[in-house]
């Protein structure tokens, strides 16, 4: 990784590409969270304190992904870091996120951006 810190025991640092990836740049990546199938932005550095400008950038990108997937005013940013409290990330949750993981097949990685594809 050319940017920031890396913790080899951290699943967000590992950044495994299993689910759909919406977006990636030098600051962050956005993919479906493996646990809840909602878009999740992850800082490309291990830690909890990105610069304020980086936080704004990441949340703007996440909000844009949500607009494309859910439409306007449907989903909201959830910055609570439950599972990985020591690496900055944020979820975008729509009202159906809880039931979706039981009703919908998980998405799969098919390159960054493009159409969301699902595991059969
Ligand atoms: Zn999640
Ligand atoms: Zn990490």
Image (cartoon, helix red, strand yellow):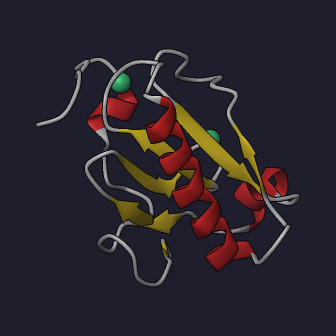
- Indicate the quadrant where residue 102 lies: bottom right
> Is residue 34 shown to the viewer in this render?
no
Query: Which residue is painted at 81% across and 50% down in the image?
Result: 98
Query: Which residue is painted at 34% across and 22% down in the image?
Result: 46
Query: Which residue is painted at 50% across and 76% down in the image?
Result: 120
Instruction: Residue 81: give x, y in percent of width and height.
Output: 63, 25
- Direction front: furthest residue: 53
Compared to 55, does 11 lie above or below? above
In the image, taking residue 14 as reference, residue 19 lies left or right, namely right
Instruction: Residue 78: give x, y in percent of width and height.
Output: 73, 40
Figure quarter occupied by ligand 2:
top left
- Direction bottom: furthest residue: 115
Compared to 46, does 33 lie above or below? below
- Indicate the quadrant where residue 8 lies: top left
In the image, taking residue 51 as reference, residue 38 lies left or right, namely right
Instruction: Residue 23: give x, y in percent of width and height.
Output: 40, 64
> Is residue 52 shown to the viewer in this render?
yes
Instruction: Residue 96: give x, y in percent of width and height.
Output: 85, 60
Q: Nearer the viewer, residue 51 or 18?
A: 51
In the image, taking residue 115 as reference, residue 81 lies left or right, namely right
Please state, as top left, top right, bottom left or bottom right, where the N terminus lies in the image: top left
Compared to 1, does 114 lie above or below? below
> How many labels, in total?
0
Query: Which residue is painted at 52% across and 22% down in the image?
Result: 84
């Amino acid at each position: 990784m050319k940017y920031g810190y890396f913790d080899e025991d951290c699943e967000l640092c590992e950044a495994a590409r299993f689910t759909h990836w919406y977006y990636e740049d030098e600051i962050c990546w956005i993919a479906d969270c493996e646990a809840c199938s909602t878009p999740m932005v992850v800082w490309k550095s291990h830690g909890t304190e990105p610069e304020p400008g980086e936080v704004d950038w990441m949340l703007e990108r996440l909000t844009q992904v949500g607009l494309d997937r859910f439409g306007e005013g449907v989903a909201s940013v959830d910055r609570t870091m439950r599972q990985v409290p020591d690496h900055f990330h944020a979820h975008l949750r729509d009202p159906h996120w809880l039931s979706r993981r039981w009703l919908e097949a998980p998405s799969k990685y098919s390159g960054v951006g493009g159409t969301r594809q699902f595991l059969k």
